[in-house]
Amino acid sequence: QQQVKQSPQSLIVQKGGISIINCAYENTAFDYFPWYQQFPGKGPALLIAIRPDVSEKKEGRFTISFNKSAKQFSLHIMDSQPGDSATYFCAARTEAAGNKLTFGGGTRVLVKP
Amino acid sequence: EPEVTQTPSHQVTQMGQEVILRCVPISNHLYFYWYRQILGQKVEFLVSFYNNEISEKSEIFDDQFSVERPDGSNFTLKIRSTKLEDSAMYFCASTGQGTSGPQHFGDGTRLSIL
């Protein structure tokens, strides 16, 4: 019930291409869905987040698409750059449950020049 | 930009020994968290802390674990008697805008149990 499933585990994309990472959840009480970017040796850094009353949110080259009925959300990285090479984690949270984050398994993205 | 600071960056400890991981959350934040990440696996919630008490804890956070805010700036995670399976990256996080604010993570402490 509490799991967040993330796919793919890894992704290779050419510079300028689009990276797409998908997540699915079961718990309909989740009310906040952030994406975190993690570089080796660093902690997760908040990239972009969405709430379920919005179907899409865009910040620069990063877009979250949210499908409430399907209980799925995805991250699109447009015009991918080598500097985007990192591990990306989706997460979900229920504010009523004390704000703990439930993370997906992560996607390692490699952008080839 | 304010940061969450964790020390040490790497801790090597013999099995059965006690270890204390330290965190300095962002100064005006009130909600604090510990997560861990076993190598190659996802980030897992351990415990949340607010107003000098635990708000929520996971099944991982058993009697061997404890948290404390000993002063106005530090937030610590203690593992009383370490086991091999405690080897992981431990991340501290904090949030300031109530429980609905984004969580800011430190760069973690790599704990290696020998």
Image (spheres, rainbow, N blue to C red):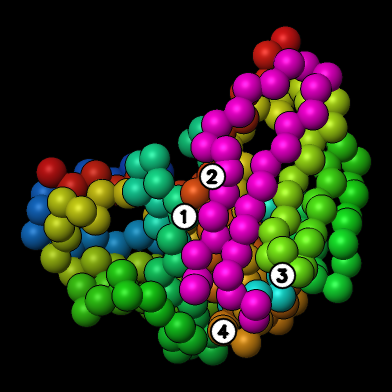
Amino acid at circle 4: Ala
Cβ atoms under marks 2 and 4 closer than 8 Å: no
Residue at x 62% of width, y 58% of height = A24
Cβ atoms under marks 3 and 1 closer than 8 Å: no
Cβ atoms under marks 4 and 1 closer than 8 Å: no
Q: B14 and A69: which one is in front?
A: A69
The chain that hosts pointer 4 is: A
Q: Are marks 3 and 4 on the same chain?
A: yes
Q: B64 and A99: which one is in front?
A: A99
3D distance between C-alphas at marks 2 and 1? 9 Å
- Residue B27 in the figure: left or right of residue B7: right
Amino acid at circle 1: Val
Residue at x 54% of width, y 44% of height = A106
Mark 3, residues whose alpha carbon is within 10 Å: few (<14), some, or many (≥20)?
some
3D distance between C-alphas at marks 2 and 4? 23 Å
The chain that hosts pointer 3 is: A
Mark 1, residues whose alpha carbon is within 10 Å: few (<14), some, or many (≥20)?
many
- Residue B3 in the figure: left or right of residue B21: right
Q: Secondary structure at mark 1?
A: strand
The chain that hosts pointer 2 is: A
* Visible residue check, residue A111: yes
Span shown in magenta: A1-29
* Visible residue check, residue A45: no
Q: Which residue is identified by label 1?
A: B43
Mark before the other along the chain sequence, 3 or 4: 3
Q: Which residue is identified by label 4?
A: A97
Q: Which residue is identified by label 3?
A: A32
Cβ atoms under marks 2 and 1 closer than 8 Å: yes
3D distance between C-alphas at marks 3 and 1? 17 Å
Q: Are marks 4 and 1 on the same chain?
A: no
